[in-house]
Amino acid sequence: MDSLTQIVLGAAVGEAVLGKKVGNKAMLYGAIAGTIPDLDIFASFFTDTVTALEIHRGFTHSIVFSVIFAFVFGWLVSRYETYKEFKGWAWLFFWAFVTHPILDAHTTWGTQLFWPLDLRLAFKTIFVIDPLYTVPFLVFLLLAMFQKRTSKKRQLYNRMGLILSTSYLACTILLKWLAFNQFEKALESQNISYNKLDTRPSPLNTILWNANVETDDAFLLGSYSFFDTQPITFETYQKNHDVIDKYRSLDKMQRMIYISQGWFTITEKDDQIYFNDLRFGLLNTEPNSENFVFKYEIQEKPNTKEIYFIESPKGSRDAKKLMSDLWVRVKGN
């Protein structure tokens, strides 16, 4: 999830664990702990694109990390804070750390919660930014913050924020199931034979859902809003995987295919080859668009047999266009 959401979650968890004893400091340290797992994003400054993608939401989003660094930070804070109980601080950091990846596991990218096992949990029930999850949670956290640490209202407000946000997260599982059934029915009614069906919410909401459908030689992309009155339609994108046959044996290509979980197409434009990760969809809703959220140019290293990937830049104009398209599409077809 986005940084603000993780800060709010961490602060609320910190308050639940230690708020009665240390007041707003529990929120402060919880908020800090809620952001620490995402420091893995700085790997992109020190390594190549593929390795940075592998590192993201890996070790720092694991139970192992939560346990080890809960002891480390708990010990450090207990050394200089007025409240000296190591166990209390360690418990705060553990829960603030571990709830971060548990929430992230509900997004499309997912997390390696059980690192070092090579298993990435991605339930794909909520977008990384969802105001319906974050805003009510933030409001209750602020209400709690301005109450005395021993006040029953403080505990009530914080508890309500946790209950509402968790309940909404649970509802997204039901909404995903309903959307999945609609896509299944559409594929059946259109006599489309397919190998796999994958669904996820569109940005900022859980009303409009997107689907990736794999067939033998292509992927079908479709969308469904709970306000739709017309049948679901699908756009076809050829896999074109044969274009990268010459690169398939290379380590970086194999790793990139594994990261995408096989949900990718290859396009060629102006003598350049692009690797398109379909798991995150498109930056607009135009028919046959190839403006994918995550699109990587494949380049060969001079005088070697190696390749590297360069992510295509995204600008504010792309974001504005996407928001405009989504607002129209959410209201139904």
Image (cartoon, rainbow, N blue to C red):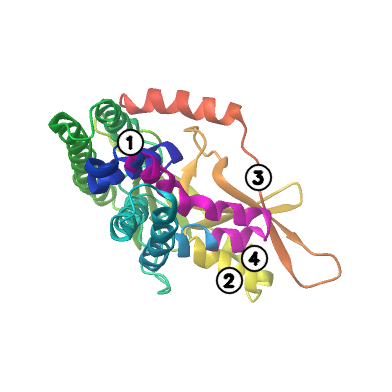
Evaluate if marks 2 and 1 touch, with contact meaning CB atoms under 8 Å apart: no
Locate residue 125 relative to residue 156 in the image: left or right.
right
Q: Badges 4 and 2: C-beta atoms under 8 Å apart?
A: no
Is residue 333 at all visible to an observer of this figure? no
Helix, strand or loop at disc 3? loop
Q: What amino acid type is highlighted by mark number 3? A: Ser
The segment highlighted magenta reads 26-54
Q: Give how far across and how far down residue 104 sits, in percent.
A: 37, 51
Is residue 44 inside the magenta stretch?
yes
Q: Residue furthest right?
A: 303
Judging by the rendered image, the residue that carries numbered circle 3 is: 312
In three-dimensional space, the C-alpha distance between marks 3 and 2, rounded to whole angstroms, equals 20 Å
Residue 245 location (% of width, % of height) = 64, 70
Q: Give the Cα separation between the discs numbered 4 and 1.
A: 55 Å
Residue occupied by mark 2: 254
Residue carrying label 4: 244
**What is the C-alpha distance between the residues marked 3 and 4?**
18 Å
In primary-sequence order, the first of circles 3 and 4 is 4
Mark 4 residue type: Ile
Q: If you read the primary sequence from the N terminus, does the residue marked by circle 2 or circle 1 appear first?
A: 1
